[in-house]
Image: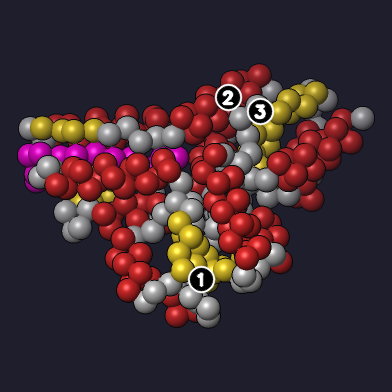
Amino acid sequence: MKVYRARHGGFCFGVKRAIRLALEAVRKVKPIYSLGPLIHNRLAVEELKKKGIITVNSIRAIKNKRVIIRSHGINPEVLEQLRKKDFEIVDATCPRVRRAQRFVERLINEGYYVVIIGEEDHPEIKGLLGYAQGRGVIFNEQLRIRHRRIGVVPQTTLDVDHFNYAISRILPNATEVKIYNTICHETVLRIKEAKKLARRCDVMIVVGGKNSANTTRLYEVCKRYKPSYHIESAEEISGEWFKDAESVGITAGASTPKIQVDQVVKRLKLLSV
């Protein structure tokens, strides 16, 4: 069985930056607290915890006033609370997410009603909605917009097909639409490559956290073409998946460490012997 590995899998720029900033901060004083997991990868977060980077879900749980803002960004009201309470803040918001936040602010200042396209429960989307200052909404199928001037900003890890579909639903309801395409180029590359691999291979393995939106999206894309499996570690792999397969493709989410992908490749090569 041949094993093909995507070139653009694993940590993206924003995740690499967040981890670097966190490790630099924790080398000075331990611990530092992350409001929500620094990245969406359970195994990686467990390793970071061993180094003194602790995940919490509320400001009250932070014991030493040292906090890191994760790569997904944060609601501006929460950020203001941290500043008022004199927290030491390490801002690891991905620059591409920060760019999307600025676009939301700009649209609001220009008088647009903002529609944010993405996953309602995702921390990036919650943060972007906060920048809309009550004059925005998250897109959904039942959305009925009654504003003539609409501004649109997508989640940075959104699938382009989903983005285009949402735009097609928004356009008929407005006289004027201003769109900022904030989808990260790395997201586009990963999805394109995943499609290419899935067409070529008999089975697809998608490696990454079960709570990772972009990893789940890669899995959804792959399974349109071939039998596909979303796993967090090599231990989950079953030989039964490859009974009649001559080839397997591997891709990984933006929050998946290289070592996790390496372990999957090693496991698959052992199965193919």
Disc 1 and disc 2 in contact, CB within 8 angstroms: no
Residue furthest front as drawn: 28
Looking at the picture, tell me which residue is in the foreground, 205 or 27.
27
The amino acid on which the numbered mark 2 sits, given as a three-letter code, is Glu
Element at label 1 = strand
228 relative position to 235: left or right: left
Quadrant of res 152:
top left
Disc 2 and disc 3 in contact, CB within 8 angstroms: yes
**Where does residue 9 sit, x and y in percent of width and height?**
63, 34
Between discs 1 and 3, the one toward the N terminus: 3
Q: Which residue is mark 1?
A: 66
**Where does residue 169 sit, x and y in percent of width and height?**
23, 34
* Quarter containing the C terminus: top right
Q: Is residue 18 visible?
A: yes
* Quarter containing the N terminus: top right
> Which label number is shown at residue 193?
2
Q: Count all numbered tags in the image, as a single digit.
A: 3
- Above or below for 118 versus 92: above
199 relative position to 243: left or right: left
Q: Report the magenta residues as a range.
A: 144-158
| Whole-number angstrom distance, CA of label 1 to CA of label 2 | 39 Å
Q: Is residue 224 visible?
A: no
Element at label 3 = loop
Q: Which residue is mark 3?
A: 6
Between discs 2 and 3, the one toward the N terminus: 3
- Above or below for 70 versus 81: above
The amino acid on which the numbered mark 1 sits, given as a three-letter code, is Arg
**Where does residue 214 sit, x and y in percent of width and height?**
51, 42
> Which label number is shown at residue 13?
none
The amino acid on which the numbered mark 3 sits, given as a three-letter code, is Ala
